[in-house]
Amino acid sequence: MSITACSLNLLTIKYLPFASGKTHTQSQPQLSVNAFQSFSTATSMGIKHNRRCSLRPKAGGSQGGPGIEGLQPQDTSQTKPEDSPTVVNTSNNASNQGSSSVLSFLCPLLKVFAGQDPSLPRNAVFEVVTSGMASISRLPWGSKALLDVATMREEKGQPERLLQLYEFEACPFCRRVREAFTELDLSAEIYTCPKGSVRHRELVRRAGGKEQFPYLVDPNTGVSLYESGDIVKYLFQKYGGGKDPSLGLLESTLFTGWVPTIVRAGRGMTLWERANPELAVKRLELFSYENNQNARLVREALCELELPYILHNVGKGSSKTKILLELTGSEKVPYLIDPNTGVNLSNHNEIISYLFQTYCKT
């Protein structure tokens, strides 16, 4: 399918702001989606490359926002914080500290089990079964968009500038935040931070002062946050109509949030030694939702390659389902768009193989 042709036929450019307040001083393209009126970044898919960058918000803002200036894959090693971010950290309770200690102990152990080359052919049955078990352990979270929020998103669109999340796939606390993104029908810029990271972990240290994940940057408000519980509450207050997080989302992580990490034996945790993320000059895009067993396998690969990407959450009831249908003829995820090569794939096995073959050192 020609994504360029599909997008140009379906979309008309005009911008629909999500939130009130001052806009950023750079000229932003205006988005209005004829058939879809909900997704403020929809036209980023498949439109000619010289227009894609303007449709992908940069970090930071004109009012001294928190982002990290120039977060582009090709020159990330040279980036510095644009300004001192407003880092909010209100969670200092014992449970958070204890959970972090457990994670510090667990990660090295899992790294041993996940030590094989992630690019090698995998047992397809084992992969799907273990990822399926991980999904079952986290039901019902991260599977669907909240109805009233999805309706609001369809009417108002995405936030004016994409939120930025620094995380790694295997982390249960990062998972908690990604589940919230699915429920709130939010798209985001994902900066994968596997252990051994050569780029993104350093950016978090510069911006926030410590290497801790997840780390959220909201260029729309000038807020940066550590602590998954604080991030989830902030997201629901700011982008969920002021409501509280869904019942059990916060508490359940302490009990079952570890299951996917253990069952998947630390996949999506460590940088692959042959990864070459510098090849991804333009940002990849992934249609996914957090608790999808096939999409999880793709996100693990993206993390192991330290590839930044645009995450389009398409949980059940999402306002973006129409876009996915028009692009692929199906509601199934994952669906990957790579503007660097013009490749678009929907089969998770093909996506994983493609990623490791394309973004590796020769």
Image (cartoon, rainbow, N blue to C red):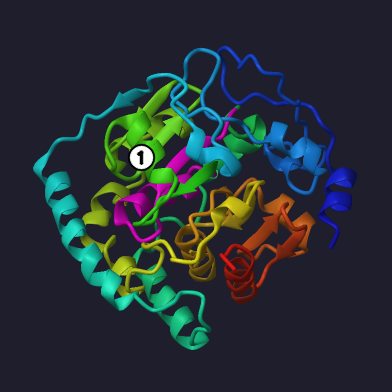
Percent coordinates x, y for residue 294 in the rendering? 53, 70
Disc 1 marks which residue? Answer: 232
Percent coordinates x, y for residue 227 in the rendering? 27, 39
Residue range corresponding to the magenta coloring = 161-185
Q: Quadrant of residue 72?
A: top right
Q: Which amino acid lies under the numbered mark 1 shown in the image of this protein?
A: Val
Q: Quadrant of residue 201?
A: top left
Residue sitting at 61 percent across and 17 percent down? 24
Percent coordinates x, y for residue 131 in the rendering? 43, 74
Residue 336 appears in view: yes
Residue sitting at 82 percent across and 37 percent down? 34
Percent coordinates x, y for residue 80 in the rendering? 45, 28
Rendered position, 222 above or below 4: above
Rendered position, 71 above or below 307: above
Q: Residue furthest left?
A: 94
Q: Is residue 182 magenta?
A: yes
Q: Nearer the viewer, residue 309 or 306?
A: 306
Rendered position, 220 above or below 198: above
Label 1 neighbour load within 10 Å: few <14, some 14-19, many 20+? many
Residue sitting at 86 percent across and 52 percent down? 6
Residue sitting at 67 percent across and 53 percent down? 321
Quarter of the picture holding the N terminus: bottom right
Residue 315 appears in view: no
